[in-house]
Amino acid sequence: MRKRITSAIVFSLATAIGLSLAGQLWVSSENADRRRFSQLADDAVGRVDARLASYVSLLYATRAFLAVDGPGISAEKFEHFISGLDLAERHDGIQGIGFAATIPAAAATSVADELSARYSRPVEIWPTTTDQPLRTPIVLLEPQDPRNRVAIGYDMYSDPMRREAMDAAARSGRPTASGAVRLVQEIDENRQFGFLIYLPVAAGEASRVSAISPSEGPGFVYAPLRTGDFLEAALFQMPQPALHVEAFDGEAKPERRIFSSREPLLPEIAHFAVERRLDVAGRTWLFRLSPTANFERLGSNYPAALLATFVLGLAIVLALLSLVQSRRLEAVAALNEASQRNLAQKDMLLREMNHRIKNSIARMLSIARQTARRAESLEDFTTRYSARLQAMAAAQEMLTRSRWGRAEIGALLSAELAQVFGEDEESCRLEGPEVEVDETVSQALGLTFHELATNAMKYGALSSPEGTLVVEWRLDGQDLVIDWHEQGGQAPDLSAARAGFGTKLIDMTIRGELGGSIERRAGEGLFAILIRFPFAGRGTSQPVPGARL
């Protein structure tokens, strides 16, 4: 688990650093193209402003011409002046330049007669009725092409949108643009919205210029413009910029949109879109400019993508190397741990062998003492002593065999205790059901019985002729309970600070290997030990009567 966490940390750090660098590279590329497009948008709006300024200059020039030339200027002379401006070739989008006189509404009939005489054709002031006290019919407009010819006599003051712009121009004395209107020149199929720019002429000058009387206020030099033609000419000159343009009169609402270019948007970089505002003769136009497919990006996302791919690959390699190194270190640690465990086990085996050799010698000495105590002669001692040594060897062989298979608890006890008691059947009583245990339990109990019997032989009940030993075992639910009870001999000191090797070996066997518990009791000439451990699934049992050794 730890090595996986380490590999995950290495992968995360490498990925985070690499992707951060890739992200910075991508952001830098994006920002460079964004700035370039923003500059392109600024240039485009700047061209609109410059073209608009040139049209306003034409209005100022026309007003000056009319003022200098004096009263009663003829249509022919005005035509000659406007033709010299070359509107068609040099000023795309502008429909012409004209003059509208301000007259009382009651003078409409007389002014219509004067206009008819001026243009040698019937001219009416239209619309014929108005709710305004003043009228501003168009009295001069060039060039006189079929589109502009229909506009002569049109009362622009009768339209609210045009009237608003003329009133604002009269108040400020500056060029003022109207909102979006349908020009009266739109007589063919290619219709589009337009706007007008008005430049006021003082009242006195207006009457001198137009030869229309009486004059009630300023007249207006004006220019009608087709919005689409004007913006197409200003924005999309060669080389054509990679722009999609939407223009709005004021707010960016669908009903206020006055222009939308034909070039399709490029969705991949639509986030480059910018907005710019432009003052158009007193009105505010909002331009929304977006890149099209013709926009060539100087930056590229490929380096960032390649860097990100390389970083991910490098992060995976580093994570795998970290994992391999962690496993290698774990293998070394496991090998070292196994070596330490083997050394400890070897030391344990050596100590156990030494302990068993000492116990075997002690048993042999004990057997010799007991045999000598009861022997009647040297020959009798030799016979009895040899028999007991043979029994000890046979029991040891049975105990050794029991470690590799199943064994019965009574047989294990009998074999171990017979080494000490020999034919003295009255010294020990064994009682319990026939319980056959598996290899693990038989090894553990054989070792435990060996230690308990040896201690009993050295210090406990078996160390004196009067001592007795009672061993009972039973099944208690899922547990096997063994009650070892000694009477006589020297009772051990259970309060000693340091336990002997045999005690440690018993505790490690019962508690460690079998998962059981041990309870010890000691008193005057009394020592008892109660062993309990889980038995379910470790053997079989059936009741048998008690037995004596």
Image: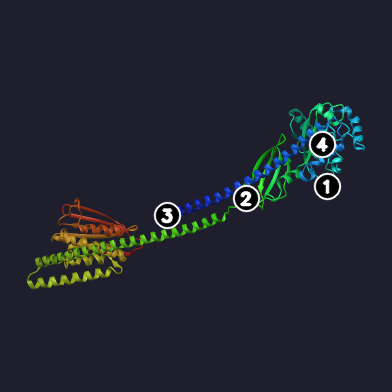
What distance separates the C-alpha of mark 2 from that of mark 3?
40 Å
Earlier residue among tags 4 and 3: 3
What distance separates the C-alpha of mark 4 from that of mark 2?
45 Å
**Front tag of 4 and 1:** 4
Q: Quadrant of residue 344?
A: bottom left
Q: Is residue 73 above or below residue 416?
A: above
Residue 5's mark? 3
Residue 199, horizontal then vertical, whole percent: 77, 33
As shown in the figure, which amino acid type bears the numbered disc 1? Answer: Glu
Say which of 167 and 21 sits in front: 167
Say which of 142 and 389 sits in front: 142
Q: Secondary structure at mark 1?
A: loop
Q: Is residue 148 above or below residue 218?
A: below
Query: What residue is disc 1 on?
Result: 189
The residue depicted at 40 percent of the width and 55 percent of the height is 2
Dot 3: few (<14), some (14–19), or many (≥20) neighbours within 10 Å?
few
Query: What residue is disc 4 on?
Result: 98
Q: Quadrant of residue 355?
A: bottom left
As shown in the figure, which amino acid type bears the numbered disc 2? Answer: Ile
What distance separates the C-alpha of mark 4 from that of mark 1?
24 Å
Q: Is residue 515 above or below residue 438?
A: above
Earlier residue among tags 4 and 1: 4
Residue 116, horizontal then vertical, whole percent: 91, 35
Would you say residue 433 is visible in this rendering? no
Residue 547, horizontal then vertical, whole percent: 23, 64
**Front tag of 2 and 3:** 2
